[in-house]
Amino acid sequence: MLKSKVETFFTEKYNSKPILVKAPGRVNLIGEHTDYNMGYVLPAAIDKGIYFAVQKNDTKNIVIETFLNQAEQIVFKLNGHSHTFTFFWGNYIKAILEILLEEKYTLKGFDCVFGGDIPIGAGLSSSAALCCGFIYALAAVNDLKISKGKIALIAQQAEHRIGLNCGIMDQYAVLFGKKENALFLDCKDISRQYVPINLQGYSWVLINSNITHNLAVDSEYNKRRNSCERVVSEIAKSNNKVHSLRDVTATDLEKVKAIVSHTDYLRASYILEENNRVLRMITALENGDAQKSGEILLEGHWAMSTRFEITTEELDLLVSAGQQLEGVMGSRMMGGGFGGCTINLIKTELVAEQSSAILTAYRKETGIDAEIYHLKIGDGVHRIA
Ligand code: GLA
């Protein structure tokens, strides 16, 4: 088991009993790119996660390592002489430590070992799990009181420093997720509610296209955000109450249709409708209506494909392959875009048969082996020892 592997590695290397923290990845049922537009999202924490073992070391060094794919270690020197970090994950850690020091948190030296099973670049927020889990573990070992809300903001800031101008959904899902539930988050005022997502007789299944993305390096994500912001500033010229697309109505948008670019118009209209899909999905879930939930997933996917333009041919293929199969109620690409997983709602008795049919169709067309993950909704970041 991953947890004991991380714990044993730590104990054998450092000869002390560590504090253990688990930070999960996340899925998102619906509400894509709505978070930085102050809209609605419906994510959930999953069972896959990153485990952290940490303990004080009475030095001025923060030593962090992972052993999963290959042994990788970085040392952050609190006296200010850190080496350049060569590992990609090290940039997140470095950004976090720098933010904490800038905000005058007092840090002591500690050792940290981590390892996880969230596939990277698959739209399951491995980086939010890394950042939120690391800050949570660091707070525990340094006796710092940092609220989960503040952890979310620091983790988000770290992403911004790396280059992804993300919203707050991933961090909230990773920190506040709850078993069996989705988290209905209003990104405008950060109010949240839990929504049970079990639909009797149906299962949520993830299919990893195995097309990986790196949103921080691919600026397409940020370009979508820029489009949305351009539309907002156009509308705000004649209405100073408008600060984000959340404050924009369909009528407001139509008024600037001829002024903004067609691409920006389509992107903004996608966001307005996506917010609405989140609300409709909640109603469908509350009514136990798998048919409707599936329809909303499909509607969301094709809107992301044709209007927001964040899917890929491969993801479209996974979704249309399912669309033709009995018992596959619907599916959609999940996360920032340009790769990663689809989330599928499938009649439980047909899951094995239909998911393997999707995989076969996908392999035939693309030559790529996709992977199936049976979704288990877990709790947000927590200490396990
Ligand atoms: C990434 C970002 C999130 C959110 C999603 C898209 O995961 O980190 O803030 O914008 O993409 O919904």
Image (cartoon, rainbow, N blue to C red):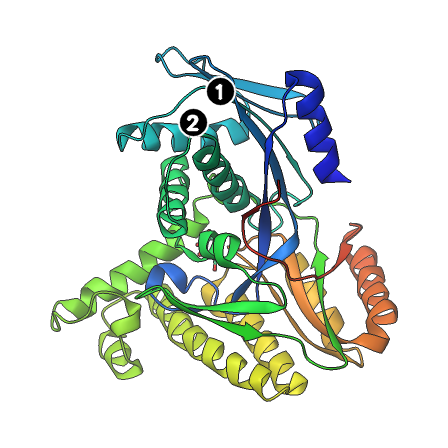
Quarter of the C terminus within the rendering: top right
Q: Residue at the location (46% across, 51% down)?
A: 171
Label 1 belongs to which residue?
85
Residue 164 seen from this side? no
Quarter of the N terminus within the rendering: top right
Q: Quick one: label 1, few (<14), some, or many (20+) residues within 10 Å?
A: some
Pinpoint residue 20: horizontal percent, then vertical percent.
60, 37
Q: Along the line of sight, which residue is nearer the eye, 316 or 146?
A: 146
The vertical placement of 15 against 250, above or below, is above
Q: Is residue 29 toward the left or the right of residue 324 in the image?
A: left
The vertical placement of 155 against 194, above or below, is above
Q: Along the line of sight, which residue is nearer the eye, 20 or 251?
A: 20
First-in-chain label (2 vs 1): 1
Q: Residue at the location (70% across, 48% down)?
A: 210
Pinpoint residue 47: horizontal percent, then vertical percent.
67, 54
Q: Is residue 197 toward the left or the right of residue 225 in the image?
A: right
Judged from the image, the secondary structure of the residue bearing numbered disc 1 is loop
Q: Is mark 1 within 8 Å of ligand 1?
A: no
Judged from the image, the secondary structure of the residue bearing numbered disc 2 is helix
Q: Residue at the location (67% across, 21% down)?
A: 71
The part of the image, by quadrant, that contains residue 333 is bottom right
Q: Amino acid at mark 2?
A: Lys
The vertical placement of 146 against 242, above or below, is above
Mark 2 near mark 1, Cβ–Cβ under 8 Å? yes
Q: Amino acid at mark 1?
A: Phe
Q: Residue at the location (54% across, 25% down)?
A: 55
Label 2 belongs to which residue?
94
The vertical placement of 258 against 318, above or below, is below
Pinpoint residue 316: horizontal percent, then vertical percent.
65, 64
Pinpoint residue 291: horizontal percent, then vertical percent.
66, 86
Q: Along the line of sight, which residue is nearer the eye, 148 or 337?
A: 148
